């Protein structure tokens, strides 16, 4: 008798949608930018691939030559492999801090990853991504960000909590998630995140998306 996995990509993504406002929009924005900026077959590295959502959308919508999806969770990689059935996609269990590529990729995506890292690991990881990109390659990072002061922090966290409640989460679940702020992940301000990319070598850095307490930043090598 076959047993279903502990959770499916659909259930996982549904839970994220109830947690992160405009989650689907993040991926669509990336697809549209890549489609506009790169016409050739694309070599792509996806860091912290999770259930393979980015890979699935890229393969379905763009001319991808090959794609490497990395995650440090064997369970996530198993689910991603089941979701993305393509000979163009390779899955590897590794940390962003351990990347050792050199000018191999046109696009790198790191969605909701680096805010889990301490500052020095964040610098090392994004520098690894910079080194892994070809000239004019695109680096997309999407992270939770820290507001500029405590007044905005209280306001934005309460708004985020309200969103989760309105999307079916219990009071306990909402409060538990909000308490992760600066304890389980370590957000920096948007300007600090832009500065980190610049410090790692990116001369062209711009916000491509922002909502609630999440920001998408694009660096071009």
Image (spheres, rainbow, N blue to C red):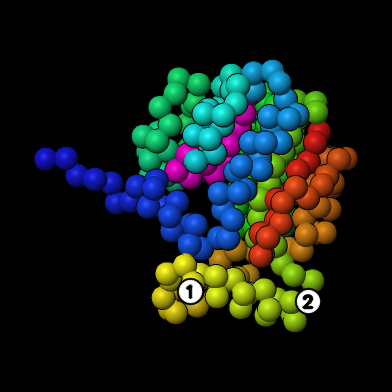
Nearer the observer, 174 or 192: 174
Label of residue 165 in the image: 1
- Pointer 2 or 1: first along the chain: 2
Up/down of 122 relative to 70, above or below: below
Q: Residue at x 50, y 78 (%)?
A: 175
Quickly name the residue at label 2. Answer: 149
Residue most toward the left? 1
Give the image location of residue 128, x and y in percent: 70, 38
> Magenta part of the protein: which range?
43-52
Q: Say which element carries label 2.
A: loop
Up/down of 185 relative to 43, above or below: below
Q: Residue at x 80, y 36 (%)?
A: 220
Q: Residues within 10 Å of mark 1 (few under 14, many from 20)?
A: some
Give the image location of residue 138, x and y in percent: 74, 34
Give the image location of residue 27, x and y in percent: 60, 43
Give the image location of residue 25, x and y in percent: 60, 49
Quadrant of residue 150 within the rendered picture:
bottom right
């Amino acid at each position: 008798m076959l047993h279903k996995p502990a959770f499916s990509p659909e259930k996982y993504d549904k839970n994220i949608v109830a947690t992160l406002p405009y989650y689907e929009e993040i991926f669509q924005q990336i697809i549209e930018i890549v489609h506009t900026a790169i016409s050739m077959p694309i070599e792509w590295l996806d860091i912290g691939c999770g259930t393979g959502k980015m890979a699935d959308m890229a393969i379905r919508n763009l001319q991808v030559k090959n794609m490497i999806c990395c995650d440090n969770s064997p369970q996530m990689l198993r689910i991603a492999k089941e979701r993305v059935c393509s000979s163009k996609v390779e899955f590897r269990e590794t940390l962003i801090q351990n990347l050792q590529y050199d000018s191999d990729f046109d696009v790198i995506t790191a969605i909701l990853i680096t805010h889990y890292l301490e500052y020095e690991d964040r610098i090392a990881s994004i520098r690894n991504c910079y080194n892994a990109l070809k000239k004019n390659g695109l680096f997309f990072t999407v992270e939770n960000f820290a507001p500029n002061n405590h007044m905005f922090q209280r306001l934005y966290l309460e708004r985020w909590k309200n969103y989760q409640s309105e999307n079916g989460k219990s009071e306990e679940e909402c409060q538990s998630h909000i308490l992760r702020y600066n304890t389980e992940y370590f957000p920096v301000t948007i300007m600090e995140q832009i500065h980190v990319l610049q410090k790692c070598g990116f001369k062209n850095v711009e916000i491509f998306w922002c909502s609630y307490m999440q920001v998408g930043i694009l660096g071009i090598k």
